[in-house]
C-alpha cells in the first residue's frame, strides 16, 4: 500500500512518526511527510499524528483511508490536547480511539479503541512516550488486520476540549505544588514551561525527575 504519515516538523511526535514509517517500509511504500501538500492522490492510507490543522475535504479525498488517533472516549473529549486535559483532571486511564477523519472535528467513525494506563507520576516526556506507543500500536493493528476493522459511528453527546497554549501552564503561587502537580507534570520545560507571577515579576518553574 501507499502510506503517508503526516507529522508537522515542529511537533514532538516526529521521531515516533519516523519510527512508524520505518516499521512499515518492509511491507509498504511508507513515508513520513511534513504537510498535507505532500500527500499524493491515490494514497491508500494517510495517518495524521499530532496535526494542529483540520484536513479539509480536498485533502481527505486524496486517500482511501484517513486515520487519526485521539486520546479520549469519543465523542466525549473531542478537540485539542485531550490527554493533557485528562491528566489535569486526575485521570489514570486514558481512552484512545483510531478513527476515520471527516471534515468535522474528531467526528468520524471509530475503528479501534484502547486505553493508556498511567501511574500518576509521569512527566510530559513519559506521557508522550506512552501516547505515541499506543498510537503506533493502533495504526499497526488496523493496517495488519484481515479483514480490516469495521468502523462504528460515534454515539452520544459530544463534548469538547479547548486549545492549550503557553498561558495554560500558569501556576497559582498561593496553592501548593502538590495541589498543582498534575498541571506541572504536563508542562514542557523548553516549549511551554510552567510559570507564575509574584510580586510584580514572572518566574519560570522547570521540573525533572531526580
Image (tube, grey):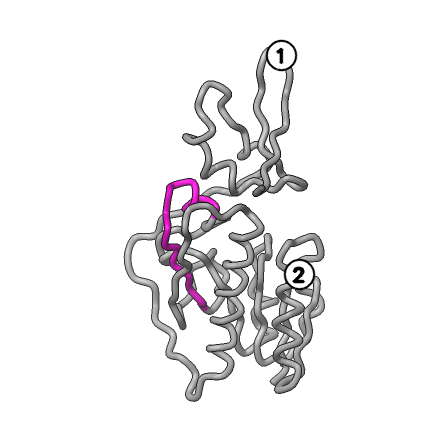
Q: Which label number is shown at residue 158? A: none
**Number of other residues with Cα within 10 Å of mark 1, as a class: few under 14, some 14 to 19, many 20 or more:** few
Residue 62 percent location from the top left of the image: 61, 74
Q: What element carries label 1?
A: loop
Q: In which quarter of the image is residue 7?
A: bottom right
Image quarter (top left, top right, bottom left or bottom right) of the N terminus:
bottom right
Q: Find disc 1 in the rendering and name its residue.
A: 200
Looking at the rendering, the stretch of residues picked out in magenta corresponds to 84-99
**Number of other residues with Cα within 10 Å of mark 2, as a class: few under 14, some 14 to 19, many 20 or more:** many
Q: Is mark 2 on a helix, strand or loop?
A: helix
* Residue at x 39%, y 55% (from the top left corner): 94
Q: Does the magenta stretch include residue 106?
A: no
Q: Which of 170 and 129 is in front in this view?
A: 129
* Residue at x 61%, y 72% (from the top left corner): 20
Q: Find disc 2 in the rendering and name its residue.
A: 14
Against 125, residue 185 (above or below) is above
Amino acid at each position: 500500500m501507499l502510506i503517508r504519515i503526516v507529522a508537522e516538523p515542529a511537533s514532538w511526535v516526529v521521531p515516533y512518526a519516523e519510527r512508524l514509517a520505518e516499521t512499515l517500509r518492509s511491507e509498504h511504500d511508507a513515508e513520513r511527510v511534513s504537510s498535507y501538500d505532500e500527500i499524493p492522490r491515490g494514497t491508500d492510507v494517510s495517518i495524521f499524528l499530532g496535526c494542529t490543522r483540520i484536513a479539509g475535504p480536498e485533502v481527505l479525498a486524496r486517500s482511501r483511508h484517513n486515520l487519526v488517533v485521539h486520546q479520549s472516549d469519543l465523542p466525549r473529549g473531542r478537540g485539542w490536547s485531550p490527554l493533557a486535559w485528562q491528566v489535569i483532571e486526575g485521570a489514570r486511564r486514558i481512552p484512545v480511539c483510531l478513527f476515520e477523519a471527516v471534515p468535522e472535528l474528531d467526528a468520524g467513525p471509530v475503528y479501534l479503541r484502547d486505553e493508556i494506563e498511567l501511574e500518576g507520576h509521569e512527566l510530559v516526556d513519559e506521557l508522550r512516550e506512552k501516547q505515541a506507543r499506543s498510537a503506533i500500536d493502533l495504526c499497526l493493528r488496523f493496517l495488519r488486520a484481515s479483514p480490516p476493522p469495521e468502523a462504528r459511528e460515534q454515539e452520544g453527546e459530544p463534548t469538547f476540549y479547548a486549545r492549550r497554549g503557553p498561558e495554560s501552564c500558569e501556576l497559582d503561587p498561593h496553592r501548593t505544588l502538590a495541589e498543582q502537580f498534575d498541571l506541572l507534570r504536563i508542562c514542557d520545560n523548553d516549549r511551554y514551561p510552567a510559570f507564575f507571577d509574584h510580586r510584580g515579576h514572572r518566574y519560570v518553574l522547570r521540573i525533572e525527575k531526580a
